[in-house]
Amino acid sequence: MSKIFITHFNDVYRVTAQKFSKSSSETINVSNFGGLLNSVRAQWETRPDGKKEGLTLFSGDAFSPSMESSVTRGSHMTAILNALDIDVAVAGNHDFDYGYLHFCKLTKDSAFPWLLSNIIDENTGRVPTPLQEMQVVERGGVRIGLIGLVEKQWIDTLLSWPANFQYKDMAQVAIDLSKKLRDPNGEHKCDIILALTHCRMENDIQLAKEAYAFSPSAYGNLHSQHGVDLILGGHDHEYYVSKAITDWEGFDATQENPDSQSDTGDVLLFKSGTDFREFSDVTIELQDAPEGSVRKKIIQVVRGRSRGCVSSSSALTGSN
């Protein structure tokens, strides 16, 4: 049994102190968030290269909107995101609020890669520079493919979008990249694939179904199907854990959510709130698939915890 450790967050805007909730007297800020994030990652084993065995993943929206970004055009967030030691991110719709060229500048100042797997520049036939189609990392002896997918609807919300940028169907791109990343004779030879998304809830659930991000108990032939193993989403500004994930501390699975009605208890996905209020602390347990399977490893357990960031903590510093 292999294990992967992940911290995940999405949709962060305000870096100054704010109330944790409307009814709360407790405040949070990015230093609280960074301190708690570092305390979780400090428990991970250290690799020979000095990095931690876990992954910190971000599902988009940081450069806008906020009071600060109205002055800085999002540039103040690059140092903050870099200090949070993100490994990989997917772009969100608000990251383009000041235009594609300005976003390019911000990503070039980032210390981590930004993904946008299902947008193609028709002039090159590739993902727009400097965005990337995918990343492959190894943690705990597991080769992990990471892709970034976005819904078509949020493109319509952008003030400007290059005419030569073509949208590709999320599920089809997920299947195509699975074939590339899992190819036993190819370059990458990935054991699993994680999809970072920036989509509305219903579109994430639909993607999970079309790209076979299923619990093995819900889909018996999962090892023979191309697709993704787990979806880590953003965009909705809410904390959500799909019904197939039953071991999660700090999330009330009984709460009504009209946007999740299509979640029938078979898909694996979660979203991690907004605005530095919380992040997800996740352990994934994997089992080897039968020899010759499309998927080398199958997720057996996703165990998580919502880490609320209201308590005082250490100042924001890097952890790996």
Image (cartoon, rainbow, N blue to C red):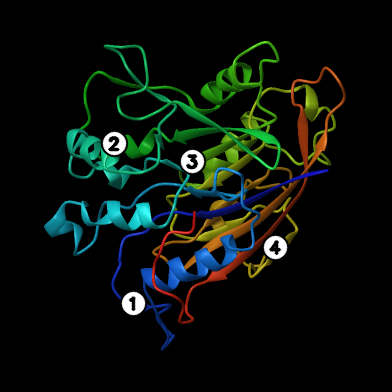
The residue wearing badge 4 is 248
Mark in the foreground, 2 or 1: 1
The foreground one among 204 and 137 is 137
Which amino acid type is shown beneath numbered disc 4?
Answer: Trp
Residue 257 in view (yes/no): no
* Local crowd size for mark 3, using a 10 Å CA cut-off: few (<14), some (14–19), many (≥20): many
Amino acid type at circle 1 is Gln
Q: Is residue 236 visible?
A: yes
Q: Which numbered mark, 4 or 2, is in the foreground of this view?
A: 4
Of labels 4 and 1, earlier in sequence is 1
Which one is earlier in the sequence, the residue at label 2 or at label 1? 1
Q: Which residue is mark 3?
A: 197
Indicate the position of residue 210 as horizontal and vertical percent values. Answer: 62, 29
Q: Which residue is pictured at 43% across the width and 36% down the height? A: 150
Mark 1 — residue?
18
Q: Residues within 10 Å of mark 2 (few under 14, many from 20)?
A: few
Q: Position of residue 235 (x, y in %)?
A: 42, 50
Mark 1 neighbour class, 10 Å CA radius: few under 14, some 14 to 19, many 20 or more: some
Query: Which amino acid, mark 2?
Result: Asp
Q: CA distance from mark 2 to mark 1?
A: 30 Å
Relative to 129, 142 lies left or right: right
